[in-house]
Amino acid sequence: GDSVTQMEGPVTLSEEACLTINCTYTATGYPSLFWYVQYPGEGLQLLLKATKADDKGSNKGFEATYRKETTSFHLEKGSVQVSDSAVYFCALSPTGGGNKLTFGTGTQLKVEL
Amino acid sequence: DAGVIQSPRHEVTEMGQEVTLRCKPISGHDYLFWYRQTMMRGLELLIYFNNNVPIDDSGMPEDRFSAKMPNASFSTLKIQPSEPRDSAVYFCASSFTGRGRNQETQYFGPGTRLLVL
């Protein structure tokens, strides 16, 4: 079945450091890929998405590129801020839709001054 | 748009009591999802509906859990009787099918924090 694997956390960075959170997936066909973010005490919210190979999703300085050849969708940001501290979830929606998402286990990011 | 609305936001109850969680999806959305989140098990999909019909309830942990969607704007998740191990944050999410860049995207509510003593 479909699955998403993301790096274990927590990830602790200093403000203005570069961020990469790895995400790889297993799925048939051409799933849509998502990154969701969960701030403390809140629900998950969509950060960015990509629906086909080589698409780049971007939002709030975060980027991720849909790499079909490596089945990856790594999240990157060039300069993190304390306000980026949150849990980040990678997810996929299978080919053909159905709107059900398969989530990774989440990666906690802590950004310190 | 008000987004997905969940109530109550916090619930504290005693073991054996019935608990009912409520969700109002975003207007026009035809999918509704119930999730449970704990430190130990992470985010788990419990059940989801399409056009008010349950599609997959394989994530519902036991017969003590039940969910209904009587109409397009309301859903409930009920636990009867509740147990301490049911303590978690329960999220409702909705999405829509059709054309547009936001189809497939799930929109989450703020969650209900349940504590069973």
Image: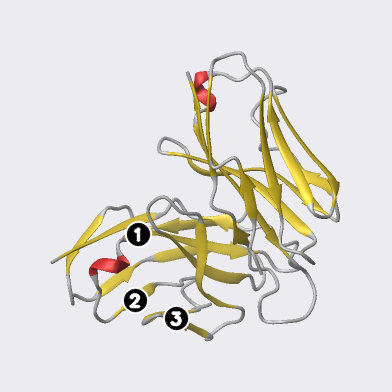
Q: Quadrant of the C terminus of chain A?
A: bottom left
- Which is nearer the eye, B61 or B12? B12
- Residue linked to disc 1: A86
The subunit letter for the residue under badge 1 reads A
Instruction: Judge whether B7 appears above or below A78 on screen.
Output: above
Q: Is residue A87 left or right of residue A80?
A: right
- Residue linked to disc 3: A59
Task: Identify the mark nearer the N-term, 3 or 1.
Answer: 3
How far is disc 3 from disc 2 in space, using C-alphas? 11 Å
Contact? badges 3 and 2 (CB < 8 Å): no
How far is disc 1 from disc 2 in space, using C-alphas? 14 Å
| Residue B41 percent location from the top left of the image | 47, 37
Q: Residues within 10 Å of mark 1 (few under 14, many from 20)?
A: many
Q: Residues within 10 Å of mark 2 (few under 14, many from 20)?
A: some
Instruction: Judge whether B88 appears above or below B29 on screen.
Output: above
- Residue linked to disc 2: A76
Whether discs 3 and 2 lie on one chain: the answer is yes
Task: Identify the mark nearer the N-term, 1 or 2.
Answer: 2
| Residue A56 percent location from the top left of the image | 49, 85
Instruction: Judge whether A14 appears above or below A7 on screen.
Output: below
- Which is nearer the eye, A74 or A62? A62
What kind of element bears circle 3?
strand
Whether discs 3 and 1 lie on one chain: the answer is yes
The residue positioned 29% from the left and 67% from the top of the image is A83
Quadrant of the rendered image containing residue A39: bottom left
Q: Residues within 10 Å of mark 3 (few under 14, many from 20)?
A: few
How far is disc 3 from disc 1 in space, using C-alphas? 15 Å
The amino acid type of the residue labelled 2 equals Glu
Numbered label attached to residue B105? none
